[in-house]
Image (tube, rainbow, N blue to C red):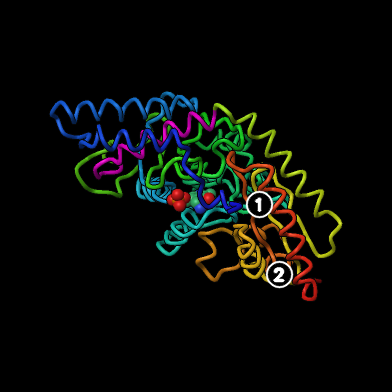
Amino acid sequence: MHYFDNAATTKPYAEVLHTFNKVNENYYFNTASIHQAGRDSAKLLEASRKQVLQLFSLPNYTCVFTSGATESNNIAIQGTLERKKRFGRTILVSQIEHPSVINIVDHYGGEGFNVEFIRTTGEGRVDVGHLESLLNEDVVLVAVMAVNNIVGSVQPVEEIKDALMNYPKVHFHVDATQAVGKAAIDYRGVDSLSISAHKFHGVKGAGALMLKEGKSSGQIHFGGGHEYDIRSGTVNLPAVAAMAKALRLTLEDMDDDLARIEGYNHSLRSELDGLESIVIQPSDVPHIINLSFTGAKGEVVVNALSEKNVMVSTTSACASKRAASNETLTAMNRSPEVIDGSIRISMSRETETENVEVLISALKEVYEEIGDVLR
Ligand code: PMP
């Protein structure tokens, strides 16, 4: 199988599975139990927390372990809005956020908040000038992702931090789910940051929400008080310890991986360059390539490739559950034909030269097979 859907999820590293299994066998205790076994498990939990924060260079932040980025985004956004609703009611959000951000913001839009969408450039990056023009004393939340999951554009997180300098009331939330191991971004100073382990070769069911010192999240979960009372519920220690390991391995090898995947990205683009009706979007990270068979349906291309044992996705696994058209490409002002015919190819450290060669041949074959519908 030739797997090119790494933006949906990645294969856990063997070392990560080893950690996961070992912790399941030896530290299956509740980290909140006060007996010795519980205390030993709590020690491992704290070591994992410290490691995650250090790897992000955010040693003084609070790291709350969650089940993944969907939960982290929901806690950050709901918690912030519940806490700040007395001080202001405007939310600024990019047009190209993941549904786990857009849908909760939409919900608050129906609860009396004013939701303003920050424009996106043709390269899929948030327009900081437009953001600046939307800032005012009523704004309490700005949410912008670090790397977009559809086209791989890197967002101007550092410029946004600067733009918000004179607005201390604003909480700046960054969804860094697609950025880990793909883009070196300085997150110091952001108010909250979400990650999800399975996007960087961890196991599913673990994520984190990192909160700037002194920023508590308003409470939206009620329970036994785990994870600073922000995310109650018995902690998934095996998945958390495995996430810390996956993070270390991913960041250690990031430069080498980027160089190799950059090469694959280049081969794909140059091999398909010049084929009429094929449109390839720009991307800032090499891992993601969004490609359209203009005139065809993305699903048809995905299925045709799948029959050749090549796995890619349409827009994104999450968005494909909804009938909605692709918000990112729409925000980038692409034509309906380009949007309908788009597929996402996403690579990871596990991608090898042979996979890319097979993908290129398969794409060319599908191009021939469906040639009559292409424009
Ligand atoms: N944010 C972004 C940018 C994503 O790509 C995803 C995963 N598709 C999520 C959040 C949600 O992550 P999870 O499904 O692990 O909760």
Q: Residues within 10 Å of mark 2 (few under 14, many from 20)?
A: some
Q: Residues within 10 Å of mark 1 (few under 14, many from 20)?
A: many
Find out whether the residues at labels 1 and 2 contact each other: C-beta distance under 8 Å.
no
- Mark 1, residue position: 151
Which image quarter holds the N terminus? bottom right
Left or right? Give the position of 140 relative to 347.
Answer: left
Residue at position x 42%, y 35% in the image: 16
Considering only order in the chain, which callout, 2 or 1, is on the residue closer to the N terminus?
A: 1
Viewer can see residue 167? yes
Q: Is residue 260 above or below residue 347?
A: above
Q: Position of residue 307 (x, y in %)?
A: 62, 65
Q: Secondary structure at mark 1?
A: loop
Q: Is residue 4 above or below residue 15?
A: below
- Mark 2, residue position: 336
Of the pair 330 and 23, the residue shown nearer to us: 23
Viewer can see residue 86? no
Q: Secondary structure at mark 2?
A: helix
Q: Amino acid at mark 1?
A: Val
Part of the protein shown in magenta: 230-251
Does 319 appear in magenta? no
Q: Is residue 354 above or below residue 316?
A: above
The label number, if any, that marks residue 159 in the structure image: none
Which image quarter holds the C terminus? bottom right
Q: Quadrant of residue 238?
A: top left
Residue at position x 43%, y 28% in the image: 53
Distance, label 1 to label 2, CA atoms, is 16 Å
Q: Amino acid at mark 2?
A: Pro
